[in-house]
Image (cartoon, rainbow, N blue to C red):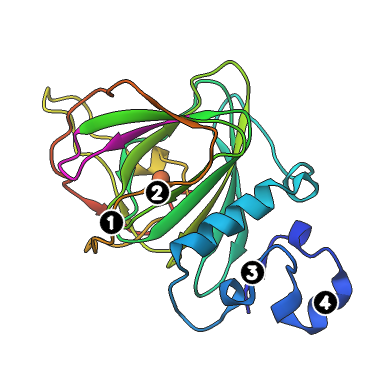
Amino acid sequence: MPLLHPVLIADPTRIADPTRLADPFVPASCLSDEPGLIDLVTLCELTAALAATPEVWRPVIRHRPDRRWYTRLLLSATVEVWLIGWYPGQQTEVHDHGGALGALTVAEGFVEEDQYDRSWTSSQMHRHGTGAVVGFDPTHIHRVANRGRQVATTIHAYSPPELSMRFAPAPADGGRAEDPRAVEIPPAAAAAATVLGPAVTIGAATAPMEAGRGDRGAPTHAVAGSGA
Ligand SMILES: [Fe+2]
């Protein structure tokens, strides 16, 4: 039985038919009890559909200055969906998704994404504005940040759900290793990543920016669980 945030249950009478609980926002394949992989296009469409429906996320979203706010909208055997509120200045650590496919849509405001190559070296930044839809292949490594002056809201989907993700290793200068528990982002997958191709950007509100910062070297540890 999938776990659904109450806001997705638009009509309580649908409880009698779990496959239609979240209709029309969530396709039946995303409500399955049988483990499986949701394709990238479906993940993008799912986050885009939810973001385009403020009646779903507006009553729920919070933006807290003391920490990034998040809640899970959906967890099934095939996918999980998170709603995240970004106060100005908040960001994730550098992380991968450990083999999971992922997608995010910006529901309001904008976020910046530092994308890293497979050696965890920063390659470029993108700014994703309201309505931008971004898909991640299983090897995608990035940091997401709200570097603006206004709050931002994003919706993320990952398949398969509840896997492990990895974080950038400690800096070469001997500084403190990044604490995965401080990363309040949705989960990702276990280590062995399969190359399926580059990340895709679908939304028109995404613009490339100048090269990012910080070489981190290869990942040194894997972290199980949601981190959220
Ligand atoms: Fe991520």
On the image, the x and y values in percent for residue 49 come to: 66, 54
Disc 1 to disc 2, C-alpha distance: 9 Å
Q: Element type at marker 3?
A: strand
Q: Element type at marker 1?
A: loop
On the image, the x and y values in percent for residue 154 come to: 58, 41
Q: What type is the residue that disc 2 sits on?
A: Val
Q: What type is the residue that disc 3 sits on?
A: Leu
The residue under the point 40% across, 30% down is 126
Q: What type is the residue that disc 1 sits on?
A: Gly
Disc 4 to disc 2, C-alpha distance: 34 Å
Specify the label residue 200 is tagged with: 2
Q: Earlier in the sequence, mark 4 or mark 2?
A: 4
Specify the label residue 11 is tagged with: none
Residue that label 1 marks: 197
Q: Is mark 2 within 8 Å of ligand 1?
A: no
- Label 2 or label 3, whichever lies nearer to me, is 2
Q: Are marks 1 and 2 in contact (CB under 8 Å)?
A: yes
Specify the label residue 14 is tagged with: 4
Q: Element type at marker 2?
A: strand
The residue under the point 43% across, 73% down is 37
